[in-house]
Image: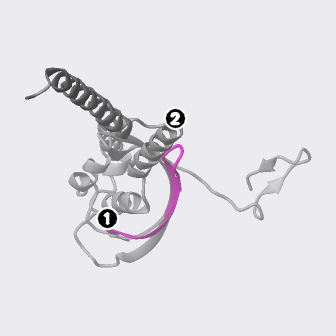
């Protein structure tokens, strides 16, 4: 015959062992998800590094693609559709207004076949500003539509400062300014050691 007291004790011990086992399993599962403060700081650091590495930076290719579309044109205004996607709306409207000035329209049809040749590009990644020395060629006609006595493939240089804005994850040119660079060797100095342009 079965001793009822022993069965009750066995049941209580079994239930106790199940409770202890459940507590141990719960603690084990809980410790898997738990991160020590040291580990937490490393995870945060890794996430920041991933974010930094995934940030978009202005590249030489971005600038070069813009310069090619901006400086290569058959005639004044012909390249507008190509450079529009590289500019903010404000700059695009400003460039169109500049092209429409009478002084620029007077040369329309005379300065033709402009081609981007090369550029020295210097990018300031902290301010998204670019200095570019651009070399391009063009032809200057004596008479509209006639190559007679034309000056062909004239090499020109332009030094410009480009300011970029990041818009919807893409860098767009926001400002174009012509600048003059001079070597320290060619600059003259006055009595107060301030450079004076020569």
Front tag of 2 and 1: 2
Q: Residue at x 24, y 52 (%)?
A: 80
Q: Earlier in the sequence, mark 2 or mark 1?
A: 2
As drawn, is 158 to the left or to the right of 80?
right
- Is the magenta region chiefly helix, strand or loop? strand
- Which stretch appears magenta? 111-133
Relative to residue 29, is residue 66 depicted above or below? below
Q: Position of residue 136 (x, y in %)?
A: 42, 69
| The one of 174 and 4 positioned closer to us in this rendering | 4
From the image, tell me which residue sits under label 2.
37
Label total for image: 2
* Badge 1 element: loop
| The one of 114 and 29 positioned closer to us in this rendering | 29
For this orientation, the residue located farthest to the left is 1
Coloring scheme used: one colour
From the image, tell me which residue sits under label 1.
72
Q: Position of residue 14 (x, y in %)?
A: 22, 30
For this orientation, the residue located farthest to the right is 191
In terms of image quadrants, where is residue 88?
top left
Q: Is residue 175 visible?
A: no
Quadrant including the N terminus: top left
Q: Position of residue 3 (x, y in %)?
A: 14, 25
* Badge 2 element: helix
Relative to residue 7, is residue 46 depicted above or below? below
Relative to residue 154, is residue 26 depicted above or below? above
For this orientation, the residue located farthest to the front is 1
Whether label 2 touches label 1, CB < 8 Å:
no
Label 2: how many Cα within 10 Å (few below 14, some 14–19, many 20+)? few
Q: Residue at x 29, y 39 (%)?
A: 168
Relative to residue 131, is residue 192 depicted above or below? above
């Amino acid at each position: 015959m079965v001793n009822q007291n022993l069965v009750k004790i066995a049941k209580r011990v079994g239930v106790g062992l199940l409770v202890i086992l459940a507590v141990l399993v719960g603690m084990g599962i809980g410790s898997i998800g738990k991160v020590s403060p040291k580990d937490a700081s490393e995870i945060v650091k890794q996430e920041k590094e991933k974010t930094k590495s995934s940030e978009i930076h202005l590249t030489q290719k971005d600038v070069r693609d813009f310069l090619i579309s901006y400086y290569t044109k058959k005639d004044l205004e012909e390249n507008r559709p190509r450079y529009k996607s590289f500019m903010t709306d404000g700059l695009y409207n400003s460039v169109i207004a500049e092209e429409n000035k009478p002084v620029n329209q007077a040369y329309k049809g005379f300065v033709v076949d402009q081609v981007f040749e090369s550029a020295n590009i210097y990018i300031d990644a902290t301010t998204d500003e670019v200095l570019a020395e651009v070399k391009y060629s063009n032809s200057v006609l004596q008479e509209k539509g006639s190559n007679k006595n034309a000056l062909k493939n004239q090499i020109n240089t332009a030094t410009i400062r480009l300011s970029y804005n990041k818009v919807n994850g893409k860098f767009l040119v926001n400002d174009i300014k012509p600048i003059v660079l001079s070597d320290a060797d060619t600059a003259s100095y006055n009595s107060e050691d301030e450079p004076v342009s020569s």
